[in-house]
Amino acid sequence: MSSSNKISPQEANEKLAESTLEGKWQTVEEIYNSYPESHTVAISDSGETALHVAIELNEEKVVKKLMEAITKHEGGRKKALEVRNQHGDTPLHVAASRGFVKLCMCIVGEENRLYLISLKNKKGETPLFLAALNWNKHAFAYLYDATKHSVILNDLIRQDGDSILHCAIRREYFDLAVIIVHCYDFLITHTNKNGITPLEALATRPSAFRSASKLSLWKLTLYHCILVEPLDVETTMDKILRKMKKPPSEKLEFPENYATLCQALLNLKSLLVGSWKEEQEKEKHDAENPQKKNSEKHEVGFLPPNYSTLQQFIRSMYVHTLGLSGVALKDVKKIKKKHQWSRQLLDKLMEKPYEAFTGRGGQPDLISGWEFDTGVFEAFHQFNQGESSSRFENVEKEKEEKIQTPMLLSSPITDSRKSTPNQNKEAKDGIDPKETAFLVAAKNGIVEMVIKILSKIPSAIHNTNTKKENVLLVAVMNRQPFVVETLRMKSKPEVWNNLVLAADDDENTMLHLAAYALGDEKPWQIPGSALQMMWDIKWFEYIKSIVPQHFNYRTNKNSKTAGEIFKTEHKDLVKEGSEWLRETSESCSVVAGLVAGVSFATASAVPGGTNDEGKPLLERQPAFEAFAVSSLIGLCFSVTGLIMFLAILTSRKEARDFRRGLPTKLLLGLSSLFVSIIAMFVSFCCGHFFIINHKYKTFLFPFYAATSIPVAFYALAQFPLYFDLLTAILSKVPRASDKVESF
């Protein structure tokens, strides 16, 4: 810019702001080259420099030019790279949070300005933290690779004490969480300010585990047909790093189905290669253990040795051959990946069961302002002789400039705890200070975690919360039948009896807690108040079969038995369920009455007339016999349905009626109504068959088939209700449905 030498620095700054906002990057580059003081000028109220804006817009060429200007005019520490916006983010923060790995590489540069990676924003987050927080794989892999020999705990936590592992679990980036525990295993024992360990954070994510996820029958079929391999951390990270270092190549054009074909071939390759590797490992293992080989030689029986590989191949071909590679398949595969990675994360956390369960790593002792322990610096410097010490020099200068950033821990990895995590928790924001990961997993119905913790820490079965509720009481209160059944099978009889006989602070037993209604939370995920009432009664009866008989008469501190609590708590639900049953029965009874009238009129009419003896003239015709049978069936079933709906309307609709009587009547009424409607259509088609001339009869069948479409729509609309009613009647232990999956 030829005129840039003639203007004042203030005018240059104004021109810089204008050109940056308008995207005139050539002018910005010229100003950066001519006016070094403009490198740190904020061009907006948010405190952003031109470099911030260029990074946010992912202008790679512009950023490289600006970095060249900054490197040219600034020696040693680059102040322009440490300028913060209103959130305290440096340019590297912005690039890492957006996932612009090339810009991260440009900012850090070949000079390895690693001190920039340790700078924190107002929330105490480093660029590495932000890359993990938003799960920008390439940026995280690059920053990890750049600092893997010099990373400290302070880089991996923020002011509220949450580590990148906490954040990855809460945001359900379980593949990232597996990578983190592999790269920074000391975070397994780290707790935040509320004393929450990563294991407890994982226990609050029930959707990450198969036992707490509700899948429809269709999705469950796909779920078992999809193969998901465990995450190999080293291979994944190496693949990401190689991809970053690989020079860009021109894109080739492939047919639309190229990706699908490649995926099918990769699946076939993984199956064959995986089977070969398993055989090789098995042979090696058998060579080391010949006795075990002989003992397991005939375990397969009549099945071939490659049975498991063949089975998985058939599953994969079943999915791809039927064309089930659309959105549904992708969703189910995503769910299975989440389950696989979360289980892998759980196994990794429980490799150190005591530390992961108790959080022996301790809380972060964070205060504002930098404080640096010179002993740690010397130890780290001696340990990493090849590393640049500019990162630690930056800490001292940040302290002199009094930039408000969280403190660097004096001993991040070997910090010993001064108190237990339960004592450090604060009873606020719904956090129970005594609730362990075992109780949280039981509350959320995560059976895998309950079993895993019990196998590693058997004493956890006696954990209680602040209300003195043990794991069984917590599971009953939160309607988790799978957890109750698991505890019943895994516990010793004496331990199980102690759990059953326990009571909370208010002297509520298991039966009292099962009697409470949880209102709008819909614990069973069943639509409709009537079905909700059926499940609550079945749950109450199931718990009653577990507890001793005298629990039926035992009172709590409010002098109420479990039966009294159930009646009081379910008054509104009984009222709502009764209203729904009344409306449903009235509507269906009207339809059943109409069908009964039509069926009666049809049954009294004889197609073709009768002879002098009163015998039908068409009695030997197949269509006439079908007409006679269908009209009789329609009349009988329509009357049966009408009687069932009238019985529901005239019932007292008390709480005990919802257990079996009302569901059975409604099921019989709906079934009879459906059969009667089908019979009515069949009788109509058979009677109409005799009216049309013979030469048009071949054209009637498509029209007769079209009359079944309304019946099919009715059946599809009523099938979910029919299935839920059938399940409520036949099942002993209530199970949650998959209705919530559609929302």
Image (cartoon, helix red, strand yellow):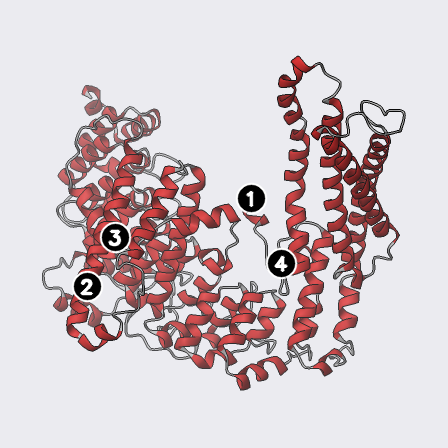
Label 4 environment density (alpha carbons within 10 Å; few <14, some 14–19, many ≥20): some
As helix, strand or loop, the secondary structure at mark 3 comes to helix
Mark number for residue 281? Answer: 2
Task: Choose the circle earlier in sequence order: 3 or 4.
Answer: 3
> Could you classify mark 2 by the number of other residues whose Cα lies within 10 Å: few (under 14), some (14-19), or many (20 or more)?
few
Disc 4 on helix, strand or loop? loop
Taking the view exactly as shown, the residue that stands out farthest to the front is 613
Q: Amino acid at mark 4?
A: Pro
Residue 117, label in figure: 3
Return the x and y of residue 155 as percentages of the image width and height: 29, 59
Pick whichever of labels 1 and 4 is earlier in the sequence: 4
- Distance in Å between CA atoms under marks 1 and 4: 16 Å
Neighbour tally class for label 1: few under 14, some 14-19, many 20 plus, Cα within 10 Å: few
Q: Where in the figure is residue 22, as x and y percent of width and height?
A: 34, 24
CB within 8 Å, label 3 to label 1: no
- Determine which residue is flagged by label 1: 742
Please give left or right for residue 420 compared with residue 10 in the image: right
The residue that mark 4 highlights is 523
Q: Give me the C-alpha separation between circle 3 and circle 4.
A: 46 Å
- Mark closest to the chain's N terminus, 3 or 1: 3
Query: Residue 712: x, y in percent?
Result: 64, 34
Seen at 64% across and 56% down, the residue is 727
Q: Residue at x 25, y 49 (%)?
A: 270
580 above or below 196? above
Amino acid type of the residue that numbered disc 3 sits on in the rendered structure = Ile
- Tell me which label, 2 or 3, sits earlier in the chain: 3
Circles 4, 2 touching at the beta carbon (< 8 Å): no
The quadrant of the rendering that contains the N terminus is: top left
Tell me which residue sits at (31%, 27%) in the image.
Answer: 256
Question: In the rendered structure, are the residues bearing label 3 and label 4 in contact, judged by CB atoms less than 8 Å apart?
Answer: no
- Name the residue type under label 1: Ser
Contact, CB < 8 Å: mark 2 with mark 3? no
